[in-house]
Amino acid sequence: MNSKDSSYRIGHRERLRKKFSDGKLVDYELLELLLTYAIPRCDVRPLAHQLMENHGTLYNIITTPIESLMKNKGVKENTAVFIKSIHEIMKRGAKDYLQTKPIFHDYQKLSEYCKVMLYGKQVEEFHILFLDSEYKLLSDDLHSSGTIDWAAVYPREVLKRALELNATSIVMLHNHPQSMTSFSTDDITITTELKNILKTVNIDLFDHLLVSGNIVYSAKNMFLIK
């Protein structure tokens, strides 16, 4: 690259940083700015456009698995890990909040956490969020990982873990990889079964949350938990 190209690249990145400070970056520019730190010696504008075209949104990009990111031409492991580190920071930040505040204190924060954890997953995952007496998060356990439309729940294992943690309530959380699909009959059946088992030892089932696309459904708010 000649000195003219190099000067333009440096100037362009300075302009991106200035626009970031002014809050004026559009999505592909924000991604481009991020990529400049992962790939400092190249013009990353074409790659930023390519990623947006292939994945649609910034959120889709950061929630895409490393292996899938690396299928994009120009994205090597170092860049994919850098992008995914943003997602990991988001997950840990959201989790930290739930560990210091009662989950019902800000249901929006709880919903954001659920989406950060499960949005974009290609198979169903079932998580159990164990809560203390103040409804703060003790642990988020990946209970099971299944197929595109199924993941197992083992009520007695949930009960055992809840007793180990001295949890007083739990939240069930899972995803549907296919967007815009609400709770299935099986989802409600296992919710009722787990609620009844936990009730025998005075542990409350606070809610069952479902991430489907960009929506978080609440069984409690939908009156599906009796």
Image (cartoon, rainbow, N blue to C red):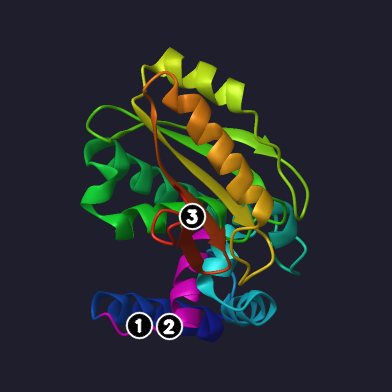
Q: Are marks 1 and 2 in contact (CB under 8 Å)?
A: yes
* Residue 224 disc label: 3
Horizontal placement of 158 versus 105: left or right? right
Q: Which residues are magenta?
A: 23-39
* Residue 12 disc label: 2
Q: CA distance from mark 3 to mark 1?
A: 52 Å
Above or below, 125 relative to 45:
above
Between 206 and 57, the residue placed more toward the observer is 206
Residue at 69% x, 77% y is 54
Query: Image quarter for residue 109?
Result: bottom left
- The secondary structure that most of the magenta stretch takes on is helix
As helix, strand or loop, the secondary structure at mark 2 comes to: helix
Residue 121: give x, y in percent of width and height.
65, 55
35 falls in the magenta region: yes
Question: Which quadrant does the N terminus fall into?
Answer: bottom right
The residue pinned by badge 1 equals 15
Amino acid at the residue labelled 2: His
Residue at 52% x, 69% y is 214
Q: Residues within 10 Å of mark 2 (few under 14, many from 20)?
A: some
